[in-house]
């Protein structure tokens, strides 16, 4: 077997600070069922969004180094905060291993699908404060109008399993009523789900936004970017590969399984998760 064919059978590495990145795993699995997926949830350090930029960069480096050490052919940074703060550094560190984040694919899809180039980004407060989507969209269209709206309660709703019903509808309505009430010329025509938790609340979010606003899911767009990269580099798994998912966490296997099953779209148990420590002693070392 040629070296390239051997490399194509290596897994795709995906990491996030917790379970949210499992929506990216779900999207990649649906799009690329022959691929072997290796997911790392850094649950001992969750959430990254409350940490300093230096800490996020350090934690992301530890996660990436661990996955590369497992033998991966491509890395997906399935965390908006880490994508905003650490992506360039990871690409330099891991080259020639391709590294894909969730921000740029989502921004590109939004620009492609928008006719008015008025964009709404729904994300956590930590992500909106970085303005990563604003920067990414403006690089593609300097005349675009972007509004970033923090909706942090969506994370708690997703993790509690309250992604449908009156509570989810009420929270979505509270966040988004002002958008729905705007005139047609003032409303965005694209909304980006800038958090990997938010796809679980697609129904309430769509209902609250009302008609005429297309929703871009950054998990799905990241999966499409993975497919494009694998095709371009000749690293796509062969058709006879069975695919599979290996789950790793740095703490709390029971909670990871309980919450993560909804994100992955299938049930798994704590016994299905490998626990590991990926971080050196907390001395600030990299």
Image (tube, rainbow, N blue to C red):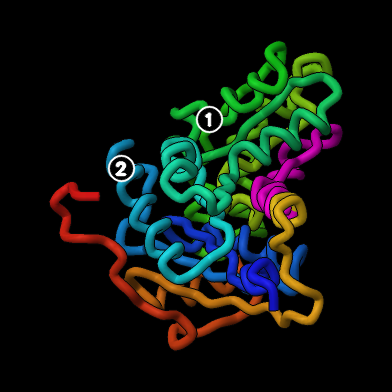
| Residue extending farthest front | 2
Return the x and y of residue 52 as percentages of the image width and height.
Answer: 29, 38
**Residue visible at 59% across and 70% down in the picture:** 11
Find numbered disc 2 in the image and state the secondary structure of the residue it sits on. Answer: loop
Name the residue tied to disc 2. Answer: 51
177 relative to 22, above or below: above
- Whether residue 38 appears in this view of the structure is yes
Q: Which badge, 1 or 2, comes first in the chain's sequence?
A: 2
Name the residue tied to disc 1. Answer: 132
Return the x and y of residue 262 as percentages of the image width and height.
Answer: 60, 69
Return the x and y of residue 47 as percentages of the image width and height.
Answer: 37, 51
Image quadrant of residue 273?
bottom left
Q: Is residue 211 magenta?
A: yes
Q: Quadrant of the N terminus?
A: bottom right
Q: Main secondary structure of the magenta part?
A: helix
- Whether residue 202 appears in this view of the structure is no
151 relative to 40, above or below: above
172 relative to 26, above or below: above
How many residues crowd around disc 2 within 10 Å: few (fewer than 14), some, or many (20 or more)? Answer: some
**Residue visible at 48% across and 76% down in the picture:** 257
**Residue visible at 79% across and 28% down in the picture:** 189
Q: CA distance from mark 1 to mark 2?
A: 16 Å
Q: In terms of depth relative to the viewer, which is nearer, 25 or 176?
A: 25
Q: In terms of depth relative to the viewer, which is nearer, 18 or 95?
A: 95
Q: Is residue 270 magenta?
A: no
Left or right: 202 in relation to 98: right
Boundaries of the magenta span = 203-227
Circles 1 and 2 in contact, beta carbons < 8 Å: no
């Amino acid at each position: 077997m040629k070296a390239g064919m051997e490399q194509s059978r290596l897994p795709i590495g995906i990491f996030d600070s917790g379970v949210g990145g499992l929506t990216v795993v779900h999207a990649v699995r649906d799009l690329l069922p022959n691929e072997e997926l290796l997911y790392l949830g850094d649950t001992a350090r969750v959430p990254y969004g409350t940490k300093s930029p230096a800490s996020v960069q350090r934690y992301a480096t530890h996660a990436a180094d661990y996955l590369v050490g497992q033998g991966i052919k491509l890395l997906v940074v399935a965390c908006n905060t880490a994508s905003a703060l650490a992506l360039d550094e990871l690409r330099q560190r891991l080259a020639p291993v391709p590294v894909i984040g969730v921000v740029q694919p989502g921004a590109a899809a939004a620009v492609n699908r928008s006719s008015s180039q008025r964009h709404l980004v729904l994300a956590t407060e930590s992500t909106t404060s970085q303005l990563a989507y604003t920067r990414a969209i403006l690089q593609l269209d300097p005349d675009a109008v972007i509004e970033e709206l923090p909706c942090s309660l969506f994370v708690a709703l997703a993790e509690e399993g309250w992604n449908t019903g009156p509570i989810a509808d009420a929270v979505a309505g509270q966040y988004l009523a002002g958008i729905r009430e705007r005139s047609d010329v003032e409303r965005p025509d694209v909304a980006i789900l800038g958090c990997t938790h938010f796809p679980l609340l697609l129904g309430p979010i769509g209902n609250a936004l009302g008609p005429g606003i297309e929703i871009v899911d950054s998990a799905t767009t990241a999966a499409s970017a993975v497919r494009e990269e694998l095709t371009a580099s000749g690293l796509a798994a062969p058709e006879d590969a069975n695919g599979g998912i290996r789950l790793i966490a740095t703490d709390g296997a029971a909670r990871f399984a309980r919450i993560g099953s909804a994100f992955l779209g299938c049930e798994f148990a704590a016994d299905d998760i490998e626990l590991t420590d990926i971080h050196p002693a907390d001395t600030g070392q990299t």
